[in-house]
Image (spheres, helix red, strand yellow):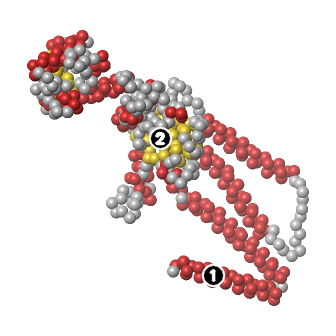
Amino acid sequence: MTLLTLLLIFILVAIVFVQLSKVNDLSAKIRGEEEVERQQNDRQAFYLMVFCVVFLVGCVWSAIYYKNVMLGYGPHTSASEHGYSLDSLFNITLFFTGIVFVITHYYLFWFSYKYKEETGRKAVFFPHDTKLEIIWTAIPFAVLVFLVVRGLQVWNEVMPDLDPTVDYLEIEATGYQFAWDIRYPGPDGKLGSKDFTKISGTNGLGLEWEDVKNLDDFMPSEIVLPKGQLVRVRINAKDVLHNFYLPHFRVKMDAVPGIPTYFHFTPIKTTEEYRQGLREYPEWNELHDPTDPDSPLRWEAFNYELACAELCGNGHWSMRRIVRIVEQDEYDEWAASQQSYYLQNIRGGDEDPHKGKLLGVEISNRGKELTSEFETALKATDAGDRVLNLKHVFFETGSATLEGKSKYELDNLAGLLAKYPTQKIEIGGHTDSVGDDGNNMLLSQSRAQSVLNYLLGKGVSSANINSKGYGETKPVDANDTEEGRQNNRRTEITLKS
């Protein structure tokens, strides 16, 4: 019904204009064509001047009115170190182009008014004016040279080649329809190499697992960066043209298939600090979702974001990713909690070229795990919480001979005992229930003694360490499954109070 009403109104308006045109034609015949044309020219010239005034005032008013939602103004000052230089460059450009914009439009409409057709007036034609041409060539030339030179200065400030000795965090962003794969270096601080021919269902980036630098890289579900840290972003694309755009940090660079690009910047405001800046503005103290009375305020719901600034397909909108900027200690804690993509998805599988080998990253992770468990047990008051399972101590089948890969766990334990020289421990050996009870007791005692002998050989004081075999008397799982029996075959240490 509404559509029909609007259609009828449109038709009626069209009929009115047609009738007015007929009336105007009739009036022209009565008053004379020349008089009507003169009046039309006068009205049109006047309306053009009115439009000029309204248009220019509207431009100024809208710029002032929307100032607080534009980048670089109000609460949206740059959140990166280099962003202020870019904002300054845009302001300088706006100043000069604004002058040209106002003057051009003023004279455009003023000339339409001043030189409207009048009876007896004849246009003067002159083909050439050297002075005028010099003026309108020299002034734009000087302004453009200034803007270009200033632009080059800012570009060189923003995009210099990084000195290898500079401390920076390098991450990688790979765009595809319709998401981003974000890759971080692990503890080694280096991103590994890639080969597009190795892209597969489990290796979407084509990482070369023979390159040990790849083994500790991780790919988190969120982007987290530390405040005050120089960040270099490698930018790639797997299919079509994308664009890596961090508007609040003034970072924008195309992601081109086959041509890696990069950008580097230093965040200077954490997410929480930016929110506190927004909090000072009334419009940011409204509900984020006006339909939900329990919705957080707009400033509370604010997040930095990564967007694709290219129209890369129908799912373009889904490439938005949240970016969190945090203090350095919070970032370090977050990064330490991330798991290697290789260890989670490739290790031990068909694509793993290191199957059967113990890797340096695994040795490092085991050391960190044992240290964390040891120090937690030291603080425990409950006796059960002061018992640690040495998960990476292994023996040859049916023997008390340590396997070679057990030395890493025991070396880490020896280091911890050296760090806490007064701490006493008991080494306990345990078996499953398969076989003779007496033999199991002897085997557990022999294994515990083998561990003790190894630690003594590493300089651990004999006054702080003893061993005991428990055989099958203290199971931690059922013995009717292979998994349960494996859990029961273990070596433990108990921290003495």
Which image quadrant for residue 144?
top right
Q: Which residue is mark 2?
A: 181
Q: Which residue is mark 1?
A: 11
For residue 106, above or below residue 133: below
Q: What is the C-alpha distance between the residues marked 2 and 1?
A: 55 Å
Q: Residues within 10 Å of mark 2 (few under 14, many from 20)?
A: some
> Is any part of residue 189 visible from this angle?
no
Residue sitting nearer the eye, 491 or 14? 491
**Residue at the (50%, 39%) spot, across then down:** 173
Residue sitting nearer the eye, 442 or 25? 442
For residue 244, above or below residue 15: above
Q: Secondary structure at mark 2?
A: strand
Q: Secondary structure at mark 1?
A: helix
Position of the C terminus, as image quadrant, is: top left
Disc 2 marks which amino acid? Asp
432 to the left or right of 113: left
Which image quadrant for residue 287?
bottom left
48 to the left or right of 307: right
